[in-house]
Amino acid sequence: MSTTRKTAVLMNPKSANGRTGKAWPRLEPRIRAVLGDYTLLVTERPWHAAELTRRALHEGHGRVVSVGGDGTHHEVLNGFFDGYLPINPEASLAIFPHGTGSDLARTLGVSREEDALAVLEQHVIRHVDIGRATFTLPGGSTDVRYFINVADFGLGGVVVANVNGSSKRLGPFLTFLLALLRSLVTFENPQVRLQIDGEHLDQKTVNVMVANGQYYGGGIHVAREAAMASGSFEVYVLGDVGFWKALWNVPRLYTGTYVDRTDLVRRFTASRVVAQSDERVLLNLDGEQPGLLPAVIEILPSALPLECAPGLKTD
């Protein structure tokens, strides 16, 4: 049942193409039966989840439950920080997935409603790594955001922009797959300069993935070896892959076996990635498309108290 700390439940009614709001009358009593009393916060606009989370933490809530999809969880995570500082380093985050992709839920093993409720009831907290990205906004200024799951740039940024501009009514698999195929048709691989823990690369690439979690893009098993308390990212630099070769390897991308193609992919374990390009290269953070290169992506080890299943492997 309820912990001694004040709990805030943040719910995004527009996630999953509006299905979360419609399901809330059914979900609410089940969540309340596990949590007891809590403060309900309902988002009304983009980035409102971060504002509400920040306010809840300043008002003394020590536990935040994020109800929605990966975009909602991303905003809630960013609400745990005020600039470069955590608002309350002891405050914990729990996710109750109800979104289009729900890739973070796959990594955490809470894709099913019953599993998410069990995690809320058991209230097992582990300190996991998160990422911090300093990147460029379209107007040329810089911004800072935190991410918990995956960052990537190149084709992935374009795909996410296309996904977020669609209705998502086809569900996660078809929504992301169709956006991937549409993006591949016109995408031109950019020349990117990289520093990966001091190792320098300068090459054309279709995509670079910096993974803290294992899944993204509505079920793509992007990083089979990623563990959220390992203290490092799994980094995959894809080569100058053309349309037909990329299309042929889409099934390998979904199963995660693309990393076995050492002729196409270079793998690194790293804590810091610096990326630059003279071309317009879009950045994706947890399924959101906030800006573009240049960017610096760095890991913050054990920075977030996260509620996890007791048997989950995180390191």
Image (tube, helix red, strand yellow):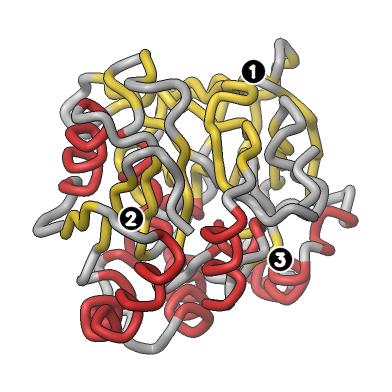
Pick the residue in front: 29 or 72.
Answer: 29
Q: CA distance from mark 1 to mark 3?
A: 24 Å
Q: Position of residue 19 (x, y in %)?
A: 28, 83
Q: Quadrant of the C terminus?
A: top right
Q: Outermost residue, left direction? A: 44
Q: Tell me the element at label 1.
A: strand
Q: Position of residue 40 (x, y in %)?
A: 21, 57
Pick the residue in front: 194 or 151.
Answer: 151
Q: Tell me the element at label 3.
A: helix
Q: Residue at x 73, y 38 (%)?
A: 234
Q: Which mark is residue 168?
A: none
Q: Residue at x 71, y 46 (%)?
A: 239
Q: Which mark is residue 195?
A: 1
User: Label 3, on which residue?
Assistant: 253
Q: Tell me the element at label 2.
A: helix
Task: Tell me if mark 1 has few (under 14), some (14-19) or many (20+) residues whose alpha carbon lies within 10 angstroms of its own.
Answer: some
Task: Tell me if mark 2 has few (under 14), some (14-19) or many (20+) residues whose alpha carbon lies within 10 angstroms of its own.
Answer: many
**Left-right relation of 131 to 124:** left
- Mark 1 / mark 3, whichever is N-terminal: 1
User: Label 2, on which residue?
Assistant: 72
